[in-house]
Amino acid sequence: MVKTTLLALSLALTFSPALAEINPILKVGIVQRFGRQGGDRLLLEAPPGEQLQLRFGGRTIPTQQVNFTVVPELLPQPQLEERVVLSYHRSFENAQASAHRWQSLGINTEIVQPDRWQVWAKRSDYDNPVARRLLLQKLRFLGNNVAQLESRWLTSKPVLQWEVNGTTYRGTTVDISTRNGIVLVNRDPYPGSFRLQPNAFGSFTLVNFVPLETYLRGVVPHEIGYQAPYSAVQAQAVLARTYALANRHRFTVDDYEICATTHCQVYEGLKNTSPLADRAIQETRGKVLTYGGKVVDALYSSTTGGITANFHDLWDGNDRPYLRAVFDTVTPPPNLDLSREQDFRRFINLRRGFNEEGWRTFRWEKFSSLEEMATTLREFLRKAGDNRTNFQRIRSVAITERSRSGRVLKMVVQTDGGTITIEKDEIRDAFHAPGSTLFYLEPQFNAAQELVGYKFVGGGLGHGVGMSQTGAYRLSRMGWSYERILAFYFRGTTLETLQPQMIALEWQKP
């Protein structure tokens, strides 16, 4: 059951007139690919004493609960579903940079996320088989072997099916709400209203329409943790708010804004909210980080390994001047250029004096055999759309370029089928051993002095850009305010109260 106090606080945060100008409604995809798996079911319920209002096809039907499924509806004749996939990416950041490059060449694009992020040639621009094949032919002529034409013939289309009071209904879009603004989704409470709608992949997305300040209640405690000291929680609240506003364009193709997973920010509605996080949200309400008068790309990760990363250490695209490498310590080590292998190894073997000292993910070592590395590399190539590279075994692996923050920028893999180069954040997909790109390699040999694998020796968990959440814990316990913590990790930014003009983002443009 949803407690009365929880409900009252949610409604107060949602409808407070003082927040009207700084509390926009977000569209959050909380169930992104409903119906992709056979037998998927989605249960929506009203809290006790309430009813769901289902609106579809010009009618409104009340009910206490509803179970949705997805069923196939036969088409009068087979239809060709086809698209040109221009590129495949681990991250939205690189997908966005790729989309900008294609657009500079005169090819309009769509950024999508069926699993890994993909960039498609805009379907409305290439709406017939001849246009799509001419585009692919042009790309092959220019030497591009990554772009793929994905085709399949459809004999049915997916539709939603649900039953109310013994009557079965079908449709493609349903709006769901309650009078008090709380809906239970698979038993968990979520605030706001909902729409179940089709997406670009032949499945459906449950979109939660939720005010920004209420949304934060489902993000902050799950991202920073329940044991975080207070000013770290306040810093997380500001970053979560800023991040959401700066990333509302991620799912434009599917008519919502952000997701509820680690591809955006973890959002769990009103499940396991925290009084401490609620207080931090209220006390920082409307506060955002800006640079040049615009909200920043407010990135954060679990653990940096002792130094944060530059934006371009992980991703391509337009620069974020405020996302620069910062030694994650109040007493930076002197005279270290971490792009030099000798300095990097010296740094990564330091254990004390860092904000993240004592955390399990601060320093780590992990062995991976050549067979394990070959398996994960093949899976990475498949997901990256590479159908041309074939190999049986790995002969050697080497780091060939490292950034000044110590991050691996490029790795070269010698195989019996040729040389494979992997760059930046793709490295963590290609090899499962490293928790970050902050590592070096130690070759491992058997008794016959044959290479059997590599030990990854490194630090950090996640991309390492922006604020270290574990570092913020220590700074908070040292008595630092949230303003000081944010200024430490985001150099040159300003903490301001949100205004509408702050949301236009120059770095999103080509």
Image: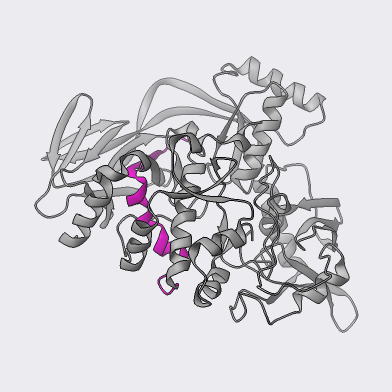
- Snapshot quadrant of residue 474: bottom right
Q: Closest to the observer: 128 or 350?
A: 350
Query: Which percent across, then down, holds residue 146?
Result: 73, 37
Query: Which percent across, then down, holds residue 252?
Result: 48, 33
Q: Residue 226 in magenta?
A: yes
User: Which residue appears at 62% of the width and 44% of the height?
Assistant: 93
Q: Residue furthest bottom?
A: 447
User: Which residue appears at 20% of the width and 24% of the height?
Assistant: 58
User: Which residue appears at 48% of the width and 67% of the height?
Assistant: 232
Q: Which residues are magenta?
A: 200-228
**Residue 192 seen anywhere in this rendered image of the structure:** no
Q: Closest to the observer: 89 or 453?
A: 89
User: Which residue appears at 13% of the width and 42% of the height?
Assistant: 63
Query: Which percent across, then down, holds residue 55?
Result: 21, 32
Horizontally, is 95 left or right of 282 in the view? Answer: right
Is residue 254 positioned above or below 302 on the image? above
**Residue 160 seen anywhere in this rendered image of the structure:** yes
Horizontally, is 45 left or right of 402 in the view? Answer: left
Query: Which percent across, then down, holds residue 128?
Result: 58, 16
Q: Closest to the observer: 423 or 443?
A: 423
- Snapshot quadrant of residue 167: top left
Is residue 16 positioned above or below 268 on the image? above
Q: Residue 202 in magenta?
A: yes
Colour convention: one colour
